[in-house]
Image: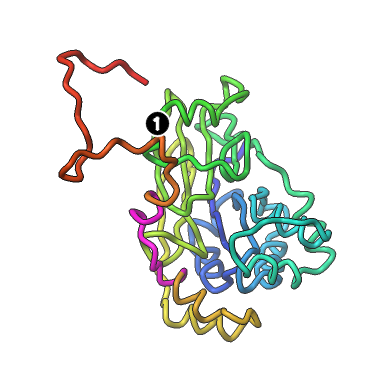
Amino acid sequence: MVGAVAVLSDVHGVLPVLEAVLAEPDVRAADLVVVTGDHASGPQPREVLDRLAAGGDRLRLVRGNADRELVALRRGEDVDVPDDVTPWAAAQLTEDQTRLLAGLPHPLVLEVDGFGAVVFCHGSPRRDDEIVLVDSPLGRWRAAFTGLPAHHRTVVCGHTHMPFVRLVDRRLVVNAGSIGMPYGRAGGSWALLHHGAVSLRHTDVDVDAAVEAVVAGSTYPHRRSWAEEYLRSANSDADAIAAFTPPGDRPAASEDGGPVVQDSGATPAPE
């Protein structure tokens, strides 16, 4: 059983921010570093995977949906991806790196002091591409936990690039946010699990220098515009939540644009 775990997620091929977070004293001192998926789909895929591989057994990688897509593209499969950086990144990978991504687990369960069995996943324990947000209804969260053993009381996820900690029907859920594509706040978001306590952490970076480092360290044709958008966190958390929330999870809007509140005179039943 380990006492302290630093959790990173969604590096998306951004080396300078990854280096800054890995240099944090509490990351260096942690018993394990777990990176919960989407490691290489971005402008510096080979460099990031080389850096992560250098972490040895102390650094554990979980498969993300973008990692799965990179492997499929490398194998010549027809994959529908919403951007051009993913096919470009797939073409940069070595065979060893492709095998590394292909062999990653999802989810990964580790015993952590103060937490017991902790489930490290990308989207949700059942699917690496499932979207569950801090304000998703309990019904959506419960569905995402389908098949999860009762004694797995802590779930650590990524995928949505926004950090949060919340309870879901007695389960503790942690999202570490994103290293390379943060929504809402520039810099590297990560989390620390330490003897039963969770803390969300943030590493400030010189964004101008990080953008230039990505531009200098990549041959991706659109690397500057990509870095300007994502390293500067041009997309807010409100933008991301609006884009990612399924229509059925959004409250109906009144004529003045606010949510419809129905007062039946009774206390609403828990969902």
Whether residue 58 sits left or right of residue 186 in the image: it is right
| Location of residue 239 in the rendering, given as x and y in whole percent from the top left corner | 36, 56
Residue beneath the point at 69% across and 65% down: 49
Quarter-of-image position of residue 69 = bottom right
Which contiguous range is marked in magenta? 230-241
Quarter-of-image position of residue 234 = bottom left
Q: The N terminus is located in which quarter?
A: top right
Quarter-of-image position of residue 86 = bottom right
Color scheme of the displayed model: rainbow
Nearest the eye: 183 or 208: 183
Q: How many marks?
A: 1
Nearest the eye: 4 or 14: 14
Q: Hey, which residue is sitting farthest top in the picture? A: 266
| Location of residue 56 in the rendering, given as x and y in whole percent from the top left corner | 72, 58
Element marked by disc 1: loop
Nearest the eye: 97 or 133: 133
Residue beneath the point at 45% across and 61% down: 182
Q: Is residue 49 magenta?
A: no
Q: Which kind of residue does numbered mark 1 sit on? A: Pro
Find disc 1 in the rendering and name its residue: 137
Residue beneath the point at 22% across and 38% down: 259
Residue beneath the point at 67% across and 68% down: 51
Up/down of 19 relative to 251, above or below: below
